[in-house]
Amino acid sequence: MSRTLATAKRVLQQLSHDPRSVALIVVLPSLLLLLFRYVYDGSPAVFDRVGPQMLGIFPFIIMFLVTSVTMVRERTSGMLERLLTTPLRRGELIAGYGLAFGAAALLQSLVSSAMAIWWLELDVSSPSAVVILAVTDAVLGTALGLMMSAFAATEFQAVQFMPLVVIPQLLLCGLLAPRASMPEVLERVSDVLPLSYATDAFSDLGTGATSTGFLAADLGVLVGCSALALVGASLTLRRRTS
Amino acid sequence: MLNIPAVEVAALSVVRGGRSVLSDVTFSVPTGQIVGLLGPSGCGKSTLIRAVVGAQRIEAGDVRVLGEPAGSACTRRSVGYVTQASSVYPDLTVRQNLRYFASLSDADDEATEGALDEVGLRARADALVRDLSGGQRTRVSLAAALLGDPDVYLLDEPTVGLDPVLRRDLWKLFARLADDGRTILVSSHVMDEAGRCDRVLLMREGRIIADATPDELRRRTGQDDLEQAFLVLAEEVAA
């Protein structure tokens, strides 16, 4: 446990020496949301429908990118090899990363949700549920980023996993077209993609058609997927390599 | 406990990318010795050290540290590994790096301050590692290995690029650690460093071509200079 906390602290210390990255993490989703709001200035109904979903999707994408690149750097620099020769366990390392980026995600979500709700007057039924779901989405992005970093040999490849892992989920999650209107095969695929559940939950929050039961189920799926991806990520850390 | 060698390697073979990197390597290192692993660049020194750390996938053979399989949970507590490229975080300060490594091996802040003094970096403790010179980074990396007070040090070319004064100081530190009963397996491609070791393993093309004390090497080859002694031995093997 103490090694997990030490790892989280180390990751945050690294971030703190990189103010530009901190600024990007904290304000980028808010800026994108602002842009989105004024692109649809003429049809506020679109912003009201899609805005809440964006609150969940931006942190997911940003955290996926930040984490996968960070982890590839750790793998290719020889740091990972050295860390794995210390008493640090693989699960402790991954949990430390999850914790640090989860904390960054909390700050990010607080800022973007606050701006969306109070400044852009986005209508959501439960602000606290928005923050909880946004953080969960960010943790999911972190977990998938940690796992996918195992398949990237360079940072260049890691960046390109973003379109590979994220864009299909964006297309299928119900953001552009309702999932029920898709061909059955695509609907089935969207059923197993975690981002679909995030989008469902945020749509419910936006329309006010919130049933606590549905929200809790969506949240449960997201937490479960994050946990699976974190376990998968720690299994990809090989102590012995060729 | 005393009769268990610190490092024991038996019939070790490693293949990387279809090429044999180590073939049938056998040696053992008793506790409290400084053993130098010498040979030209590319002869398999780093791979051998990685195998002893437990980071290298091996083809055949047995590698043990203090009687336990290399890389197992209990050996990881008793091994300090310094990689060839300094593996510390460039975007942390020297002290932040050391505190992190200290917390991984349950060492305290006092150990961090002690390690800073051992490698002579107190004046740069709050500098970011990326602002340090190559030699200073190597010393941070070495300091990180000192923190857990390990029984066995596995050091891959720790003195590359250091000025002669620092090199001498580090070898004094290694000697002090060995006097305290620590074991050191250290690689180098600089032959004059062989003279500072209790024993030398000469490597060439993935094999150990000599395992002797520096004096034995000089006697056997009739050469005072260890560089010349290596040449004589390498030619003997080739012939």
Image: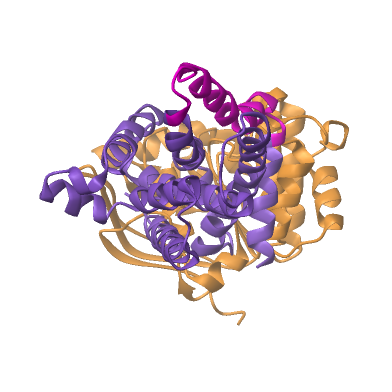
Q: Is residue B102 above or below residue B83?
A: below
Q: Is residue B198 magenta?
A: no
Instruction: Classify residue B110 as left or right of residue A9.
Output: right
Q: Please provide the residue range marked out in magenta.
A: A16-45
**Residue nearest the viewer, comparing B93 with B154:** B93
Identify the residue at image location x=42%, y=60%: A218
Identify the residue at image location x=36%, y=45%: A148
Percent x, y of residue B125 = 83, 36
Q: Which chain is purple?
A: A
Quadrant assignment for the N terminus of chain B: bottom right
Identify the residue at image location x=43%, y=59%: A234
Identify the residue at image location x=70%, y=50%: A9
Q: Colour of chain B?
A: orange
Q: Is residue B85 above or below residue A236?
A: above
Instruction: Classify residue B137 as left or right of residue A202.
Output: right
Percent x, y of residue B174 = 70, 50
Q: Is residue A42 above or below residue A59?
A: above
Quadrant of residue B150 in the image? Answer: bottom right
The main secondary structure of the magenta stretch is: helix
Q: Is residue A44 magenta?
A: yes
Percent x, y of residue A175 = 34, 38
Mark yes or no: residue A125 visible: yes
**Residue nearest the viewer, comparing A112 with B51:** A112
